[in-house]
Image (spheres, rainbow, N blue to C red):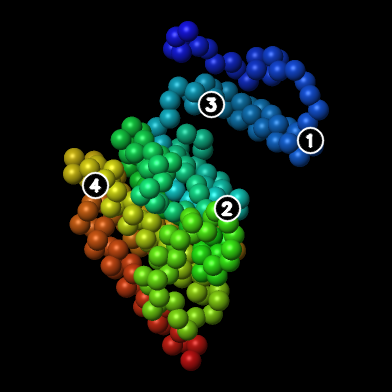
Amino acid sequence: MNPNNLTIATSASSSNSISPRKMNKDVEKLIDNNHQWCERIKNEDPTFFERLSLAQSPKYLWIGCADSRVPAERLTGLEPGELFVHRNVANLVVHTDLNCLSVLQYAVDVLKVEHIIVCGHYGCGGVMAAYDNPELGLINNWLLHIRDTIYKHQSMLTNLSRKRLVDLLCELNVVEQVMNIGNSTIMQNAWKRGQKVDVVGFVYGIQDGYLRDLGITAENAESLEKNYRLSIAKLSEAKTLSTSGNE
């Protein structure tokens, strides 16, 4: 069978072909919500789904935390098709993670996104777990990458309240992931061929809903190194001011 000849069933034909079964109420709620959302969108824009089905051409790749309180499209005010999204615990970009690197490569080489956003959030459970280092099982291996950041910036993480320490570590983690993306062969090759794509670092405040720009933006290999140093210096200065103000 030629896969190119396969047809994709519409939502209407799919629902008619599936035998009814009793669903858990929590799961059924998702279907009900979807139908309401779908009807609302169709009423507002009758051709929305038809246009959406033709192709995607997002300007942005979003690499964020899997935390359920950080909904990428919603907090940026973007619509379906405008944001290419990859999420994992603590928004890490690891050079052995083929999942993340595949998303990055597809976004840069195929979709030709113009902006790559690494977005962490304050109070990140993954960051806190990396610092506290409890025995959590398999995920401890993943969190080792954040522990590397802790060791690297240990001098900045002293004489701080618990909350301020975690917040600063969340910020440092984002900066390090921006650096990891910029140092990847995917980005290095894109910049060498003159592709216009930048990498930026944001942190989201769950407590107030605002995104904050951490001031690290890389448009090429040179600005990556320069702005990394500037961003670390800025965070160090802010830490010094906050601790001196508490004396």
- Badge 1 crowding class, 10 Å Cα cut-off, few under 14, some 14 to 19, many 20 or more, is few
Q: Position of residue 122 (x, y in %)?
A: 53, 64
Q: Earlier in the sequence, mark 2 or mark 3?
A: 3
User: Which residue type does callout 3 highlight?
Assistant: Phe
In this picture, residue 50 sits left or right of residue 34: left
- Badge 3 crowding class, 10 Å Cα cut-off, few under 14, some 14 to 19, many 20 or more, is some
Q: Position of residue 13 (x, y in %)?
A: 65, 14
Give whichever of 79, 90 is nearer the camera: 90
Residue that numbered label 4 is attached to: 188
Q: Earlier in the sequence, mark 1 or mark 3?
A: 1
Q: Earlier in the sequence, mark 3 or mark 4?
A: 3
Secondary structure found at label 1: loop
User: Which residue type does callout 4 highlight?
Assistant: Gln
* C-beta proximity under 8 Å, tags 2 and 3: no
Residue that numbered label 2 is attached to: 67
Residue that numbered label 3 is attached to: 48
Per the model, the C-alpha gap separating discs 4 and 1 is 48 Å
User: Which residue type does callout 1 highlight?
Assistant: Asn
Q: Nearer the viewer, mark 1 or mark 3?
A: 1
- Badge 2 crowding class, 10 Å Cα cut-off, few under 14, some 14 to 19, many 20 or more, is some
* C-beta proximity under 8 Å, tags 3 and 4: no
User: Which residue type does callout 2 highlight?
Assistant: Asp
Q: Which mark is residue 24?
A: 1
Q: Earlier in the sequence, mark 2 or mark 4?
A: 2
Secondary structure found at label 3: helix
Give whichever of 132, 241 is nearer the camera: 132
* C-beta proximity under 8 Å, tags 1 and 3: no
What residue is rendered at 40% in x and 75% in y? Answer: 154
Q: Quadrant of residue 84?
A: top left
